[in-house]
Image (cartoon, rainbow, N blue to C red):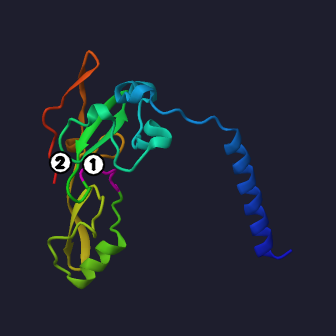
Amino acid sequence: MTTTNACLAGLAAAIGAWAVTMARAEPVPAAPHGDAVAFCKAHRSVDFPGRLFFGAGYRPGAIPRQLSKLDGPLRWRCMEGRVWVCSDSADGDWCAKKDVSLRPSPLLRQACREDPERVSLSFAEAHYSAFDWRCKGGTPVIIQSYPLDRHGFFKASWIPLVVRRGVVIGPTELPAGPR
C-alpha cells in the first residue's frame, strides 16, 4: 500500500468513526420558547450562540425575538450567565472577536512594503485586530491597543442586557464601539 493510500484509508476510518458518533449523539435542543435570558443562564458563556439557540431554525443574522426591539445591527452572546448585546459597525468590526497577535498579518506587512510611512491602514489590512497599526520604515508597528474582555471582544462595544421581571427594558442606548 502506498503512503497516499494509507493516509486515505486512515482518513476514511476517522470519518467513519466520527459519523457513527454523530449518529448516536443527542440533538441539541433549541432554547425553550426562544428565551435568550433563560438560554444564557443555562449555557453561561457562548460567544456565538445563534446555531445553538435557534437549532434547526437558525438563519444567519437572526436574533431572539425579545431582542428585536433594540436598535441597530445587533449581535448578542452569553457571558457569565447573562445576555450581552452589541450594535455593530458598518464593517462588522466592533462586535467581532479580536486577533490579539502581536505579529502583523501578511496584508499589513505588504501594505507597509508598498508605503513605508503609511499612517492609516484599511480595515481589510488590520481586520479584527485588537490593535491599531501604522507603518514605520516599512514595518507595521502597533500605535494603540484596546481593552478586551475575557473572551477577546472589545470591552467598550458590549453591554449587558437589562431585564426586569422577565421583560427586556434595555439597554436604551448601545455603545458606539471603541474606534
Q: Which mark is residue 177?
A: 2
Residue occupying image coordinates x 48% and y 33% = 30
Residue farthest toward the bottom in the current orientation of the protein: 114
Q: Earlier in the sequence, mark 2 or mark 1?
A: 1
Frontmost residue, 179 versus 31: 31
Is 92 one of the magenta-colored residues?
Answer: no
Residue occupying image coordinates x 75% and y 68% = 8
Question: Which residues are drawn in magenta?
Answer: 94-100
- Give above or below for 107 relative to 155: below
Q: CA distance from mark 2 to mark 1?
A: 8 Å
Circles 2 and 1: CB atoms closer than 8 Å = yes
Q: Is residue 153 left or right of residue 27?
A: left
Q: Amino acid at mark 1?
A: Cys
Q: Position of residue 143 (x, y in %)?
A: 18, 62
Q: Position of residue 73 (x, y in %)?
A: 23, 48
Q: Quadrant of residue 122?
A: bottom left
Q: Quadrant of residue 141?
A: bottom left
Q: Could you say whether the residue bearing mark 2 is in a helix, strand or loop?
A: loop
- Give above or below for 172 relative to 75: above
Q: Position of residue 151 (x, y in %)?
A: 36, 42
Q: Amino acid at mark 2?
A: Gly
Name the residue carrying label 1.
95
Frontmost residue, 78 versus 167: 167
